[in-house]
Image (cartoon, helix red, strand yellow):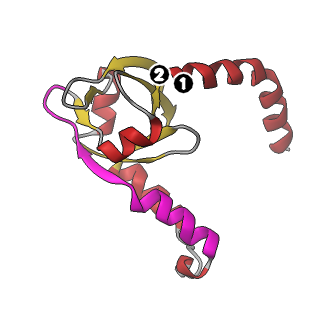
């Protein structure tokens, strides 16, 4: 399970180290794609396969017939990239994804169970503060949805 929060620097070649605790679970190749909010999502190849299946219309496999699904698939798949983790645990984040979330010197790397999120450190701090204030309310809402 991918959990925890880490702040890592981005080197002059646009590489960032994956936390050592994540490397074993992630494997050598990962998929990085635009996330929701102001982050990027990182998936293992196995988890990406699951996401891909869920994003396609599994009953008819004709997801291209639905405009909303087409557009979301373009967003997720069209800007996804397969990236290798090098021998010392670094990944190269493509410039178009770095620019999307304004990554410059540091990145917040967050484990969210089945994926990793990469955030601009300032945006993560702001988002985290909002979430922390809403934690009880969110828990109540989610508990109600589980009934």
Quarter holding residue 146: top right
Most extreme residue toward the left is 87
- State the residue in front, 100 or 3: 100
Q: Residue at x 56, y 19 (%)?
A: 125
- State the residue in front, 101 or 34: 101
- Mark 2 vs 1: CB contact within 8 A: yes
Secondary structure type for disc 2: helix
Q: Residue at x 70, y 18 (%)?
A: 132
Q: Which residues are magenta?
A: 67-88
Let me know if residue 15 is in the magenta part: no
Label 2 and label 1: CA atoms lie apart by 5 Å
Residue 100 shows up from this direction: yes
Residue 55 in percent (x, y) is at 54, 64
Image quadrant in which the N terminus is located:
top left
Let me know if residue 74 is in the magenta part: yes
Residue 104 in percent (x, y) is at 36, 26
Disc 1 marks which residue? 124
Q: Residues within 10 Å of mark 1 (few under 14, many from 20)?
A: some
Residue 32 in percent (x, y) is at 37, 46
When the figure is inspected, residue 120 is found, relative to residue 60, above or below; the finding is above
Secondary structure type for disc 1: helix
Disc 2 marks which residue? 121
- State the residue in front, 61 or 92: 92
Give the number of the disc on residue 51: none
When the figure is inspected, residue 10 is found, relative to residue 41, above or below; the finding is above
Q: Residue at x 46, y 37 (%)?
A: 101
When the figure is inspected, residue 79 is found, relative to residue 22, above or below; the finding is below
Quarter holding residue 6: top left
Residue 115 shows up from this direction: no
């Amino acid at each position: 399970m991918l959990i925890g929060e880490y702040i890592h620097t981005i080197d002059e070649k646009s590489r960032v180290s994956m936390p050592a605790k994540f490397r074993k679970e992630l494997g050598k190749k990962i998929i990085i794609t635009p996330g929701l909010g102001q982050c990027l999502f990182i998936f293992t190849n196995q988890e990406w396969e699951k996401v891909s299946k869920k994003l396609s219309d599994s009953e008819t496999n004709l997801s291209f017939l639905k405009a909303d699904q087409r557009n979301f698939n373009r967003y997720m798949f069209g800007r996804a990239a397969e990236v290798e983790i090098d021998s010392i645990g670094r990944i190269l984040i493509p410039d178009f994804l770095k620019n999307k979330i304004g990554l410059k010197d540091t990145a917040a790397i967050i484990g969210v169970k089945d994926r990793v999120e990469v955030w601009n450190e300032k945006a993560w701090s702001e988002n985290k503060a909002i979430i922390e204030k809403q934690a009880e309310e969110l828990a109540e809402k989610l508990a109600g949805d589980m009934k």
